[in-house]
Image (cartoon, rainbow, N blue to C red):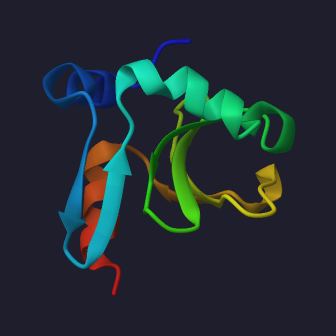
Amino acid sequence: MTLPKDYANFLREHNGGEGFIGDSYIIFFKAEELVDFNREYEVEKYAPGILLFASNGGGEAYGFDTHDVEMPIVRIPFIFMERQSAETIARDLAGLFAALEDLK
């Protein structure tokens, strides 16, 4: 699977990280954690086609919808995770940063 270019560049430059964007907290997983994290949460079983790459440190994760050729970014709950619960919140990483900045 080919990751979106902006996210691949972010991984190369930062390889994960965490902090506040506005009032929103986000934890980006390291490249070497992506496969294990998605496997441990059984994402392919409960939300097929979603590739998680970050968390808000609480009950929600952020991921790419790989069933869409544009791979938009979705927010999905960890508890009762299911594909139908995935909410598209951004088209790319810059859009995610803007969405997090705007959350109150």
Residue 101 position in % (x across, y down): 24, 71
Residue shown at the point (22%, 30%) measured from the top left? 10
Residue 62 position in % (x across, y down): 50, 51
Furthest-bottom residue in this view:
104
Quadrant for the C terminus, please.
bottom left
Q: Is residue 97 visible?
A: yes
The answer to which quarter of the image holds residue 75 is bottom right
Q: Is residue 66 visible?
A: no
Q: Nearer the viewer, residue 71 or 58?
A: 58
Give the side of residue 49 with respect to residue 29, left or right. right
The answer to which quarter of the image holds residue 43 is top right
In the displayed structure, would residue 7 be above or below residue 72? above
Residue 18 position in % (x across, y down): 25, 51
Residue shown at the point (57%, 33%) measured from the top left? 37
Residue 82 position in % (x across, y down): 81, 53
In the displayed structure, would residue 27 be above or below residue 59? above
Residue shown at the point (77%, 56%) measured from the top left? 81
In the displayed structure, would residue 85 be above or below residue 24? above
Residue shown at the point (54%, 54%) measured from the top left? 61
